[in-house]
Image (spheres, helix red, strand yellow):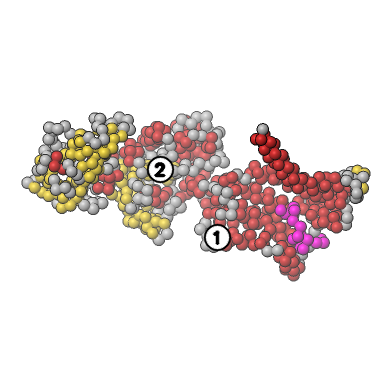
Amino acid sequence: MAGTGARVEIEGLSVGYGSSLIIDGLDLDIGAGSFVALLGASGCGKTTLLKALSGLLPAANGRIHIGGTDVTHAPPERRPSTMVFQSYALWPHMSVAANIGYGLKLRRQSKPAIDARVDEILALLGLQGYGDRRPTALSGGQRQRVALGRAIAIDPPLLLLDEPLSNLDASVRQTMRSEIRALQERLGLTTVLVTHDQEEAMIMADRILVMDRGRILRDGTPEDVWRRPMSAFVARFLGADNGIAADFADVDGGTELTLIDGSRVVLPGRPAFEGPGEVRFRSAAVGFGGAGNGGDGLRLSGRVVSALYPGGRHRYVVDTAVGSFTVEESRRASVGEAVVLAVPADELHLFPADSAEGLAQHLPGGGHLRVSRPVTDCLA
Amino acid sequence: MRAAVVQVATGAARIGVIAVMAFAVFGPLANLALWAFAERWYTPHALPISWSLRWWEIVFRPTGDAMASLLTSVWIALLTVIVALLLSIPAGYALARLKLPFRTLIMVLFLLPQAFPSVSIYINVARVFYALGLAGTIPAVVLVHATHGLVYSVWIATAAFAAVDRDTELAARDLGASHFHAFLTITLPQAAPGITASAIFVFLESLDEFTGTFFVGVPQVTTLPLLLYNAGMGGNYQIASITALILLVPSIAFMLLVERFLGADVLSRIGR
């Protein structure tokens, strides 16, 4: 059954509600059988793009080809795609089996063929014996499965998932993530997932598109996007919550950062840009540095202002002269304690100021760091 | 001790209020029931002097006026329901789903026939129907009843359609159903309980309607309420009471059904 997925080509697509365009001139090519996640905050245009693919929202301009066929102006019922709605949109007046068999019935399949296929889908989703129940009699995770079963029963060349897991408990969500991924790989369906959950996108998809204001800011494999966000916005969206404003300069083939308090740090490698910019890093990448440890990266002295223990590692907020940062650290520290934050050079993401799409410089690991002023001077 | 007295007093007051309300509701009904079986009954006697089933025989005689007008009433009520549904299903769907200009105005328009004194409206309707040669026919009465019933059926149908999750309809279209097929298989079945309830309201209103029938139907069309009126005016309280009791049966039966059909989700959307 594998390999039923279709290639999707989008050229110069513009979509919107009324006269305001949410997406304007978007190009995208999705390979057959791939699992693409559209990742972004609400209002970034990811759901609009999904609706445009399904035909629920008409395209104002541009072209959409699914499996080589132009479907730009086709209504939803004439498109080969099927969608799993965020609300599941199951039909409460029909049994689970009738819900799943609806698309097959529309395609005028014989009753025994429909029954056989419905049984197959129920077995595939671990819902054996639930065929006669009403969707309202099922748990959230089971409903989610029925919605998925209804969408895949007709072997759609393109499967669209609109925040399919957002209404589920954390534990059920974890299971469903891997189940959907395994199913997609088994059936070879081209799948487009819309989500605002970075972890969900990373785990499920093999290609991630980070969107903002109707544009695609970053397009790559989960690991590539994670390691090289390429813009401050994407970095922030992928968990690099900590940011420091800095001036960048090329000094003897290294990158010199001047922080807002006047302190200077030199990172290895030539800078890709000079002038004002921003350094971003994840809270998990920061650790408390030892006293004598003058190694790689950035070192900042500060004081713990809040300490939380969510399990596993402690989560601290540390105030420094250049801002306050969140830190995940296994070592215990109490509020008010003076600490030194250390971020390895290869965990620092550097962006020019206002770099929604700007080129980012990523530093190779293993370089050495020069601190032109003792970091302890940073302490206010 | 004092608390116990207060408790007894409030208990007694509560029972008193319930008794007054029960009398207001069941007093007239008891009077009807007594009259239906009375042979002779006049003041100062508190209860009928003699009892009889004679009038029931007269009412239920196959050739009697009562059975004929009951049939007419039911027939008119059924036709009224059909006319009202044919209009209110598309109208309710449009009002619930489409972005119509002047939506509120349209909703209020259906309320208008109820807003003016009915006699003045029906006199003019009768005049128009006379000019059209419609007066005194069943279609004339059905039209008048349907106009009257549309406010219920359109408002309830709108609420029923609005209560149907739009995504369920879109999901059907996404799977390949045409707009109309999605409406028939997904939207309408989900709105069906509300629509059924509105049909029941229209049916009961039609069965009960007097003023409009009187102006456009008399003398050719005699419904049960008209028969009741004639019997009452003629001083035959027995026939009037039995007719009234007959009219009660469908009302009570349907009210019980409506309560089952109309969920809170639909009721809360009526008039929005």
Q: Which residues are magenta?
A: B205-220
Confirm whether the magenta stretch covers residue A338: no
Q: Please, is residue A326 above or below residue A214 in the view?
A: above
Asked whether residue A159 appears in the rendered view, the answer is no
Which residue is labeled 2 in the image? A163
Q: Please, is residue B129 above or below residue A21 in the view?
A: below
Quadrant (top left/top right/bottom left/bottom right) for the C terminus of chain A: top left
Helix, strand or loop at disc 2?
loop
Extreme residue toward the bottom, this view: B131
Q: Which residue appears at 41% of the width and 44% of the height?
A: A162
Query: Amino acid under label 2?
Result: Glu
In the displayed structure image, the side of residue B70 where residue A315 appears, left or right: left
For the residues labelled 2 and 1, the Cα–Cα distance comes to: 33 Å
- Where in the figure is residue A152, as x and y percent of width and height? 44, 39
Query: Amino acid under label 1?
Result: Arg
Confirm whether the magenta stretch covers residue B209: yes
